[in-house]
Image (tube, coloured by chain):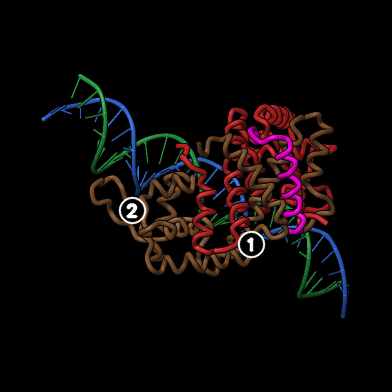
Chain colours: A brown, B red, C blue, D green
Amino acid sequence: MALEFDPIEEAAENWRSAGWGAVDAMTAATSITRAHQILTGRIDAALAPVSLNFSRFEVLALLSFTKEGRLPLGKVGDRLQVHPASVTNTVNRLEADGYVRREPHPTDRRTTFAVLTAAGRRRAERGAAALADIDFGVAGMGGRSRAATNKAIHELRSAAGDFV
Amino acid sequence: MALEFDPIEEAAENWRSAGWGAVDAMTAATSITRAHQILTGRIDAALAPVSLNFSRFEVLALLSFTKEGRLPLGKVGDRLQVHPASVTNTVNRLEADGYVRREPHPTDRRTTFAVLTAAGRRRAERGAAALADIDFGVAGMGGRSRAATNKAIHELRSAAGDFV
DNA sequence: ACCAAATACTTGGACGTCAAAGTATTCGGA
DNA sequence: TCCGAATACTTTGACGTCCAAGTATTTGGT
């Protein structure tokens, strides 16, 4: 499975040879893509025994941080930065599993709340423990590297307009 | 769309308050996830006019770096680190668009080559130009940050057994 | 008060990814 | 030589994501 060489380094060499430019940018983009792939694999594996995946866990965690364990679906999408359709999908599944339930907004009938159930709150805690156990998938990355990554990506997110 | 605060920083605070631990790891994982989302969006948008996406472009680029513009499907998967089924899928699409064609291996009938066509080679070059134009999606990230990210993720990939 | 525009969510469709199973072929030890 | 194990790819199916369109409701300007 493991190659004898670093495939990203190899790609960078080829890129240079072809005179294609933006090599460091290409390397950064490819690295992030691969990192994401590694993390997703590890995280989903760690959450599977708790019958969650990262998206579902994120919703439960977000809800558990609110005062009342409830949030309009739209807010969930804003906070987690995912498409409204994805929120609907994720909440459907959480609701089917009994971790969340939908409730109408008392005055604005367009709005629906996702409300954490007791089971959902327990599930969020078990998920958090499972993720902490595997260091959120970044095992192998030193503390200094994590900080550097966070800082670098903070620049990217800022430039992308994630926040003011 | 843009929030008034950094949602990842917010999550870290909540995490800390809840006493959930591994906060820096959580932040790193979340950052990488978000970075990937930003890059994917930008890259796919840049490649759309060339009627490619990142996966398809990667295959064309990889083939164009080989001596004869051909590689067994399995090797493609190894190099790009994607599932065999994804390679089949991607090559199907490239073949339908006339950028690649399948050819049988002369001696091992289990093996199939993906062979770059002339149109495919041109398309790879246009794709590379389009990506260089947008700095592979990492615009906003300084050179120092890109290098730091590459180094940090190199650690992660190494620990994950990506190469020897 | 009215009605077009904005907002909130859901639905349906196109894709991409991976896992598991299926088919074909080659390898390697008894 | 034979046959089980390994290899290479495809197929099928479960998911997750986004976009575009559709429904319902509320806002806001006249």
How busy is the neighbourhood of tag 2: few (under 14 within 10 Å), some, or many (20 plus)? many
Q: Amino acid at mark 2?
A: Phe
Taking depth in this image into account, of B99 and C15 the one nearest to the observer is C15
Q: Position of residue B75 (x, y in %)?
A: 77, 49
- Residue highlighted by disc 2: A113
**Residue at horizontal 81%, vertical 43%?**
A10
Q: Is residue A42 magenta?
A: no
Where is D3 relative to A31, above or below? below
The quadrant in which the C terminus of chain B is found is: bottom right
Q: Are marks 2 and 1 on the same chain?
A: yes
State which tag comes first along the sequence, 2 or 1. Answer: 2
Q: CA distance from mark 2 to mark 1?
A: 31 Å
Q: Is residue B73 visible?
A: no
**Residue at horizontal 62%, vertical 40%?**
B93
The chain identifier of the residue carrying mark 1 reads A
In the rendered structure, the answer to whether residue A159 lies left or right of residue A20 reads left
Q: Which residues are magenta?
A: B138-159
Label 1: which secondary element: helix
Residue A63 is tagged as none
Residue A135 is tagged as 1
Magenta residues, dominant SS class: helix
Q: Position of residue A100 (x, y in %)?
A: 38, 61
Q: Amino acid at mark 1?
A: Asp
**Residue at horizontal 45%, vertical 37%?**
B1
In the rendered structure, the answer to whether residue A83 lies left or right of residue A43 reads left
Q: Is residue A51 visible?
A: yes
Label 2: which secondary element: strand
